[in-house]
Amino acid sequence: MINQDRILAEFLELVQVDSVSGHERALADLLASRLKELGLDVYEDGAGAVTGGEAGNLIATLPARGPERPLLLVAHMDTVEPGRGVRPVVENGVVRSAGDTILGGDDKAGIVTILEVLRVIKEDQLVHGGLEVVFTIGEESGLLGAKHLDHTRLRSSTGYVLDCDGPAGTIVMQAPAQDKIEAVVRGRAAHAGINPEDGVNAIAVAAHAVARMNLGRIDEETTANIGVISGGKATNIVPDFCRLEGETRSLTGHKCRAQTAAMVEVLETTAARFGARVEVTTQTLYHEFKLDESHPAIVVAQKAAENLGLVSRLVKTGGGSDANIFNARGITCVNLGIGMQKVHTTEEFIRIDDLVTNARYLLEIIRVANAGDR
Ligand code: ZN
Ligand code: CA
Protein backbone atom coordinates (compact mmCIF):
# COMPACT_ATOMS: atom_id res chain seq x y z
CA MET A 1 0.00 0.00 0.00
CA ILE A 2 1.16 3.48 -0.81
CA ASN A 3 1.94 5.23 2.44
CA GLN A 4 1.59 9.01 2.62
CA ASP A 5 3.55 9.41 5.87
CA ARG A 6 6.42 7.38 4.47
CA ILE A 7 6.49 9.38 1.24
CA LEU A 8 6.45 12.69 3.08
CA ALA A 9 9.15 11.61 5.55
CA GLU A 10 11.40 10.44 2.76
CA PHE A 11 10.78 13.57 0.70
CA LEU A 12 11.69 15.78 3.68
CA GLU A 13 14.80 13.69 4.25
CA LEU A 14 15.97 13.89 0.64
CA VAL A 15 15.46 17.63 0.20
CA GLN A 16 17.72 18.16 3.21
CA VAL A 17 20.59 16.32 1.54
CA ASP A 18 22.45 18.94 -0.50
CA SER A 19 22.91 17.91 -4.13
CA VAL A 20 23.63 21.00 -6.19
CA SER A 21 24.82 20.00 -9.69
CA GLY A 22 28.27 18.46 -9.52
CA HIS A 23 27.93 17.79 -5.79
CA GLU A 24 25.70 14.74 -5.77
CA ARG A 25 27.97 12.45 -3.70
CA ALA A 26 26.01 12.44 -0.43
CA LEU A 27 22.67 11.91 -2.17
CA ALA A 28 24.04 9.25 -4.50
CA ASP A 29 25.39 7.29 -1.53
CA LEU A 30 22.09 7.54 0.32
CA LEU A 31 20.07 6.49 -2.73
CA ALA A 32 22.41 3.65 -3.62
CA SER A 33 21.97 2.13 -0.16
CA ARG A 34 18.21 2.64 -0.30
CA LEU A 35 17.94 0.99 -3.71
CA LYS A 36 19.98 -1.98 -2.43
CA GLU A 37 17.67 -2.31 0.58
CA LEU A 38 14.80 -2.48 -1.88
CA GLY A 39 16.43 -5.41 -3.63
CA LEU A 40 17.90 -3.68 -6.68
CA ASP A 41 21.35 -4.21 -8.15
CA VAL A 42 23.02 -0.81 -8.09
CA TYR A 43 25.82 0.37 -10.35
CA GLU A 44 27.37 3.82 -10.39
CA ASP A 45 28.79 4.72 -13.79
CA GLY A 46 31.81 6.88 -14.58
CA ALA A 47 29.90 10.00 -15.67
CA GLY A 48 31.11 11.92 -12.62
CA ALA A 49 34.75 11.57 -13.60
CA VAL A 50 34.02 12.70 -17.16
CA THR A 51 31.93 15.72 -16.17
CA GLY A 52 33.98 16.82 -13.16
CA GLY A 53 31.22 15.88 -10.71
CA GLU A 54 31.52 14.12 -7.36
CA ALA A 55 29.31 11.17 -8.27
CA GLY A 56 28.21 9.23 -11.33
CA ASN A 57 24.75 8.23 -12.45
CA LEU A 58 23.08 5.43 -10.51
CA ILE A 59 21.77 2.60 -12.64
CA ALA A 60 19.72 0.13 -10.64
CA THR A 61 17.89 -2.93 -11.84
CA LEU A 62 15.09 -5.02 -10.39
CA PRO A 63 14.60 -8.40 -12.05
CA ALA A 64 11.13 -9.14 -13.40
CA ARG A 65 8.50 -10.92 -11.38
CA GLY A 66 6.55 -12.39 -14.27
CA PRO A 67 7.22 -12.09 -18.02
CA GLU A 68 10.11 -9.82 -18.96
CA ARG A 69 9.22 -6.39 -20.29
CA PRO A 70 11.74 -3.99 -18.77
CA LEU A 71 10.73 -0.42 -18.14
CA LEU A 72 13.04 2.52 -17.49
CA LEU A 73 12.30 5.03 -14.70
CA VAL A 74 14.37 8.21 -14.53
CA ALA A 75 14.78 11.13 -12.14
CA HIS A 76 17.71 13.46 -11.56
CA MET A 77 19.64 13.83 -8.33
CA ASP A 78 21.01 17.33 -8.77
CA THR A 79 19.35 20.65 -8.03
CA VAL A 80 19.95 24.26 -9.03
CA GLU A 81 21.21 26.96 -6.64
CA PRO A 82 20.38 28.26 -4.09
CA GLY A 83 20.02 24.64 -3.03
CA ARG A 84 22.27 24.20 0.01
CA GLY A 85 20.90 23.85 3.53
CA VAL A 86 17.27 23.44 2.47
CA ARG A 87 14.92 23.63 5.50
CA PRO A 88 11.56 22.29 4.37
CA VAL A 89 8.39 23.73 5.89
CA VAL A 90 5.18 21.69 5.91
CA GLU A 91 2.04 23.77 6.15
CA ASN A 92 -1.56 23.23 5.05
CA GLY A 93 -0.72 20.15 3.02
CA VAL A 94 2.09 21.88 1.17
CA VAL A 95 5.87 21.50 1.41
CA ARG A 96 7.94 24.58 0.70
CA SER A 97 11.39 25.83 1.60
CA ALA A 98 12.01 28.28 4.42
CA GLY A 99 12.28 30.90 1.67
CA ASP A 100 16.04 31.26 1.38
CA THR A 101 16.60 28.29 -0.95
CA ILE A 102 14.79 26.30 -3.58
CA LEU A 103 12.90 23.28 -2.23
CA GLY A 104 14.49 20.72 -4.54
CA GLY A 105 11.23 18.98 -5.36
CA ASP A 106 12.77 19.29 -8.82
CA ASP A 107 13.57 16.48 -8.90
CA LYS A 108 13.44 14.85 -5.48
CA ALA A 109 9.67 14.53 -5.88
CA GLY A 110 10.49 12.26 -8.83
CA ILE A 111 13.02 10.26 -6.83
CA VAL A 112 10.63 9.80 -3.89
CA THR A 113 7.91 8.63 -6.27
CA ILE A 114 10.16 5.95 -7.71
CA LEU A 115 11.36 4.81 -4.26
CA GLU A 116 7.84 4.53 -2.87
CA VAL A 117 6.73 2.51 -5.89
CA LEU A 118 9.70 0.17 -5.52
CA ARG A 119 8.83 -0.27 -1.85
CA VAL A 120 5.20 -1.12 -2.59
CA ILE A 121 6.25 -3.53 -5.34
CA LYS A 122 8.53 -5.29 -2.87
CA GLU A 123 6.07 -5.37 0.04
CA ASP A 124 3.10 -6.50 -2.00
CA GLN A 125 5.16 -8.75 -4.28
CA LEU A 126 3.59 -7.18 -7.34
CA VAL A 127 4.08 -8.57 -10.83
CA HIS A 128 6.24 -6.43 -13.11
CA GLY A 129 8.37 -6.93 -16.19
CA GLY A 130 11.64 -5.74 -14.70
CA LEU A 131 12.54 -2.20 -13.75
CA GLU A 132 15.61 -0.17 -14.60
CA VAL A 133 15.97 2.90 -12.42
CA VAL A 134 18.35 5.68 -13.43
CA PHE A 135 19.10 8.57 -11.10
CA THR A 136 21.16 11.04 -13.11
CA ILE A 137 23.67 13.68 -12.12
CA GLY A 138 24.06 17.12 -13.69
CA GLU A 139 20.64 17.39 -15.34
CA GLU A 140 20.42 21.07 -14.45
CA SER A 141 23.85 21.79 -15.89
CA GLY A 142 22.97 20.63 -19.40
CA LEU A 143 21.73 17.04 -19.08
CA LEU A 144 25.35 16.07 -18.41
CA GLY A 145 24.63 12.85 -16.57
CA ALA A 146 22.22 11.49 -19.18
CA LYS A 147 24.64 12.46 -21.95
CA HIS A 148 27.48 10.53 -20.37
CA LEU A 149 25.36 7.65 -19.12
CA ASP A 150 26.57 4.18 -19.94
CA HIS A 151 23.51 3.30 -22.04
CA THR A 152 24.80 -0.15 -22.88
CA ARG A 153 23.72 -1.19 -19.39
CA LEU A 154 20.05 -0.58 -20.20
CA ARG A 155 17.71 -3.05 -21.88
CA SER A 156 14.46 -1.09 -21.74
CA SER A 157 13.01 0.23 -24.98
CA THR A 158 10.52 2.49 -23.18
CA GLY A 159 10.75 4.72 -20.17
CA TYR A 160 9.33 7.45 -17.99
CA VAL A 161 11.20 10.50 -16.84
CA LEU A 162 9.60 12.03 -13.74
CA ASP A 163 10.69 15.62 -14.05
CA CYS A 164 8.04 17.98 -15.27
CA ASP A 165 5.68 20.51 -13.75
CA GLY A 166 1.96 20.05 -14.10
CA PRO A 167 -0.06 17.48 -12.16
CA ALA A 168 0.16 13.71 -12.56
CA GLY A 169 -1.46 12.93 -15.90
CA THR A 170 0.63 15.55 -17.69
CA ILE A 171 2.51 13.68 -20.41
CA VAL A 172 5.22 15.51 -22.33
CA MET A 173 5.39 13.96 -25.78
CA GLN A 174 7.26 16.75 -27.57
CA ALA A 175 10.27 18.81 -26.51
CA PRO A 176 12.64 21.17 -28.36
CA ALA A 177 16.18 20.91 -29.60
CA GLN A 178 18.58 23.43 -28.13
CA ASP A 179 21.78 25.02 -29.47
CA LYS A 180 24.22 27.05 -27.44
CA ILE A 181 26.07 29.98 -29.00
CA GLU A 182 29.22 31.54 -27.59
CA ALA A 183 30.90 34.46 -29.35
CA VAL A 184 33.97 36.52 -28.59
CA VAL A 185 34.18 39.82 -30.46
CA ARG A 186 37.74 41.07 -30.77
CA GLY A 187 38.25 44.75 -31.57
CA ARG A 188 41.29 46.94 -30.95
CA ALA A 189 42.20 48.70 -27.71
CA ALA A 190 43.03 52.42 -27.62
CA HIS A 191 42.94 55.26 -25.11
CA ALA A 192 39.37 56.50 -25.00
CA GLY A 193 40.39 60.17 -24.54
CA ILE A 194 43.62 60.43 -26.51
CA ASN A 195 43.26 58.26 -29.62
CA PRO A 196 39.83 56.58 -29.74
CA GLU A 197 39.98 56.69 -33.55
CA ASP A 198 42.68 53.99 -33.39
CA GLY A 199 40.37 51.65 -31.50
CA VAL A 200 37.65 49.22 -32.54
CA ASN A 201 35.06 49.04 -29.77
CA ALA A 202 34.22 45.37 -29.28
CA ILE A 203 31.27 46.20 -27.02
CA ALA A 204 29.76 48.52 -29.63
CA VAL A 205 30.22 45.87 -32.32
CA ALA A 206 28.54 43.26 -30.12
CA ALA A 207 25.72 45.70 -29.37
CA HIS A 208 25.15 46.36 -33.08
CA ALA A 209 25.06 42.64 -33.75
CA VAL A 210 22.61 41.90 -30.92
CA ALA A 211 20.38 44.78 -32.03
CA ARG A 212 20.22 43.30 -35.53
CA MET A 213 19.34 39.80 -34.30
CA ASN A 214 15.85 38.40 -34.36
CA LEU A 215 15.38 37.31 -30.73
CA GLY A 216 12.61 36.15 -28.40
CA ARG A 217 9.80 34.14 -29.95
CA ILE A 218 10.76 33.52 -33.57
CA ASP A 219 7.73 31.44 -34.45
CA GLU A 220 5.26 29.18 -32.69
CA GLU A 221 7.91 26.55 -31.99
CA THR A 222 11.19 28.48 -32.09
CA THR A 223 12.83 30.82 -29.57
CA ALA A 224 16.18 32.61 -29.35
CA ASN A 225 17.99 34.53 -26.65
CA ILE A 226 21.23 36.32 -25.88
CA GLY A 227 21.50 35.84 -22.13
CA VAL A 228 25.02 36.87 -21.12
CA ILE A 229 27.27 39.71 -22.21
CA SER A 230 30.57 40.78 -20.71
CA GLY A 231 33.63 42.73 -21.69
CA GLY A 232 35.72 45.82 -21.20
CA LYS A 233 38.17 46.84 -18.49
CA ALA A 234 37.78 50.56 -17.80
CA THR A 235 35.91 53.59 -19.08
CA ASN A 236 39.10 55.11 -20.47
CA ILE A 237 39.94 52.13 -22.66
CA VAL A 238 38.22 51.36 -25.96
CA PRO A 239 37.38 47.70 -25.28
CA ASP A 240 39.03 45.11 -27.48
CA PHE A 241 36.99 42.25 -26.13
CA CYS A 242 33.32 41.38 -25.67
CA ARG A 243 31.85 37.99 -24.99
CA LEU A 244 28.28 36.87 -25.69
CA GLU A 245 26.36 33.75 -24.78
CA GLY A 246 23.02 32.79 -26.22
CA GLU A 247 20.76 29.93 -27.13
CA THR A 248 18.19 28.86 -29.67
CA ARG A 249 15.43 26.28 -29.28
CA SER A 250 12.87 24.77 -31.58
CA LEU A 251 10.48 21.86 -31.61
CA THR A 252 11.71 21.36 -35.19
CA GLY A 253 15.42 20.62 -35.28
CA HIS A 254 16.24 22.31 -38.58
CA LYS A 255 14.57 25.55 -37.43
CA CYS A 256 16.81 25.55 -34.37
CA ARG A 257 19.89 25.15 -36.55
CA ALA A 258 18.65 27.80 -39.02
CA GLN A 259 18.10 30.31 -36.20
CA THR A 260 21.57 29.56 -34.83
CA ALA A 261 23.09 30.03 -38.29
CA ALA A 262 21.24 33.34 -38.70
CA MET A 263 22.66 34.65 -35.41
CA VAL A 264 26.18 33.54 -36.35
CA GLU A 265 25.81 35.27 -39.70
CA VAL A 266 24.77 38.54 -38.03
CA LEU A 267 27.78 38.35 -35.73
CA GLU A 268 30.17 37.74 -38.62
CA THR A 269 28.81 40.39 -40.99
CA THR A 270 28.61 43.00 -38.22
CA ALA A 271 32.15 42.30 -37.06
CA ALA A 272 33.42 42.56 -40.64
CA ARG A 273 31.60 45.86 -41.16
CA PHE A 274 33.30 47.44 -38.14
CA GLY A 275 36.75 45.92 -38.70
CA ALA A 276 36.48 43.58 -35.73
CA ARG A 277 36.93 39.84 -35.59
CA VAL A 278 34.55 37.37 -34.06
CA GLU A 279 35.11 33.81 -32.89
CA VAL A 280 31.86 31.91 -32.66
CA THR A 281 31.30 28.43 -31.32
CA THR A 282 27.95 26.70 -31.49
CA GLN A 283 26.95 23.43 -29.95
CA THR A 284 23.80 21.35 -30.14
CA LEU A 285 23.03 20.62 -26.48
CA TYR A 286 20.27 18.16 -27.27
CA HIS A 287 17.90 17.12 -30.02
CA GLU A 288 14.15 17.52 -30.18
CA PHE A 289 11.74 14.65 -29.83
CA LYS A 290 8.17 14.13 -30.87
CA LEU A 291 6.38 10.91 -30.07
CA ASP A 292 3.43 9.53 -31.90
CA GLU A 293 0.24 9.54 -29.82
CA SER A 294 -0.13 5.85 -30.52
CA HIS A 295 3.24 4.97 -28.98
CA PRO A 296 2.85 2.45 -26.13
CA ALA A 297 4.65 4.79 -23.70
CA ILE A 298 1.85 7.32 -24.21
CA VAL A 299 -1.03 4.87 -24.49
CA VAL A 300 0.00 3.25 -21.20
CA ALA A 301 0.35 6.61 -19.43
CA GLN A 302 -3.07 7.72 -20.69
CA LYS A 303 -4.75 4.46 -19.71
CA ALA A 304 -3.18 4.57 -16.24
CA ALA A 305 -4.43 8.14 -15.75
CA GLU A 306 -7.90 7.15 -16.90
CA ASN A 307 -7.94 4.18 -14.52
CA LEU A 308 -7.23 6.51 -11.60
CA GLY A 309 -9.63 9.22 -12.71
CA LEU A 310 -6.80 11.63 -13.45
CA VAL A 311 -7.05 14.04 -16.36
CA SER A 312 -4.40 13.12 -18.92
CA ARG A 313 -2.96 15.87 -21.06
CA LEU A 314 -0.49 15.38 -23.91
CA VAL A 315 1.70 18.46 -23.97
CA LYS A 316 4.69 19.93 -25.70
CA THR A 317 7.23 21.85 -23.66
CA GLY A 318 9.82 24.55 -24.28
CA GLY A 319 12.37 22.88 -22.04
CA GLY A 320 14.75 19.97 -22.46
CA SER A 321 15.06 17.11 -20.01
CA ASP A 322 16.84 13.80 -19.70
CA ALA A 323 14.03 12.46 -21.91
CA ASN A 324 15.60 14.29 -24.89
CA ILE A 325 18.80 12.32 -24.43
CA PHE A 326 17.15 8.93 -23.92
CA ASN A 327 14.94 9.45 -26.96
CA ALA A 328 17.98 10.35 -29.08
CA ARG A 329 19.63 7.10 -27.93
CA GLY A 330 16.66 4.97 -28.93
CA ILE A 331 14.86 4.54 -25.61
CA THR A 332 11.43 6.09 -26.11
CA CYS A 333 10.72 8.26 -23.09
CA VAL A 334 8.00 10.68 -22.13
CA ASN A 335 8.41 13.17 -19.31
CA LEU A 336 5.68 13.10 -16.68
CA GLY A 337 4.27 15.97 -14.64
CA ILE A 338 4.83 15.41 -10.92
CA GLY A 339 3.10 18.46 -9.48
CA MET A 340 6.17 20.49 -8.64
CA GLN A 341 5.50 24.21 -8.73
CA LYS A 342 7.56 27.41 -9.12
CA VAL A 343 10.71 25.34 -9.63
CA HIS A 344 14.08 27.10 -9.75
CA THR A 345 12.78 29.77 -7.34
CA THR A 346 12.89 30.15 -3.56
CA GLU A 347 9.07 29.93 -3.68
CA GLU A 348 9.16 26.38 -4.99
CA PHE A 349 6.57 24.10 -3.41
CA ILE A 350 4.70 20.84 -3.85
CA ARG A 351 1.46 19.55 -2.38
CA ILE A 352 1.62 16.39 -0.28
CA ASP A 353 -1.41 15.14 -2.21
CA ASP A 354 0.61 15.41 -5.41
CA LEU A 355 3.46 13.35 -3.92
CA VAL A 356 0.96 10.62 -3.10
CA THR A 357 -0.83 10.83 -6.45
CA ASN A 358 2.52 10.55 -8.25
CA ALA A 359 3.20 7.23 -6.54
CA ARG A 360 -0.29 5.91 -7.27
CA TYR A 361 0.07 6.98 -10.89
CA LEU A 362 3.51 5.47 -11.46
CA LEU A 363 2.41 2.22 -9.84
CA GLU A 364 -0.61 2.12 -12.15
CA ILE A 365 1.60 2.84 -15.17
CA ILE A 366 3.77 -0.15 -14.27
CA ARG A 367 0.67 -2.29 -13.77
CA VAL A 368 -0.88 -1.27 -17.10
CA ALA A 369 2.42 -1.69 -18.93
CA ASN A 370 2.46 -5.33 -17.84
CA ALA A 371 -1.22 -6.14 -17.81
CA GLY A 372 -1.62 -6.33 -21.57
CA ASP A 373 -5.09 -4.79 -21.17
CA ARG A 374 -4.11 -1.53 -22.78
ZN1 ZN B 1 14.29 18.82 -13.09
CA1 CA C 1 14.89 21.79 -13.34
Image (cartoon, rainbow, N blue to C red):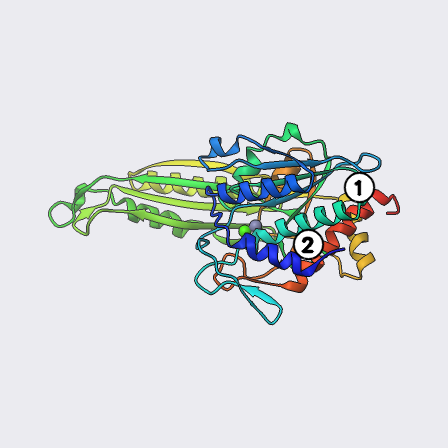
Q: Is residue 273 left or right of residue 262?
A: left
Q: Is residue 190 left or right of residue 318?
A: left
- Whole-percent x, y for residue 356 in the image: 69, 59
Closer-to-camera residue (248/308): 308
- Whole-percent x, y for residue 6 in the image: 66, 57
Find numbered disc 1 in the image and state the secondary structure of the residue it sits on.
loop
Find numbered disc 2 in the image and state the secondary structure of the residue it sits on.
strand
Residues under labels 1 and 2: Cα distance? Answer: 28 Å
Query: Which residue carries the number 2 mark?
Result: 315
Tell me the quadrant of the picture where the N terminus can be found. Answer: bottom right
Name which residue lies at 26% across and 40% down: 187
Observer able to see residue 193: yes
User: Going from the N terminus, do you reach mark 1 or mark 2 first?
Assistant: 1
Query: Which residue carries the number 1 mark?
Result: 128
Where 159 falls versus 152 (above or below)? below
Observer able to see residue 167: no
- Whole-percent x, y for residue 171 in the image: 70, 52
Name which residue lies at 68% across and 60% down: 4
Q: Is residue 252 left or right of residue 360?
A: left
Residue 307 sits in quarter: bottom right
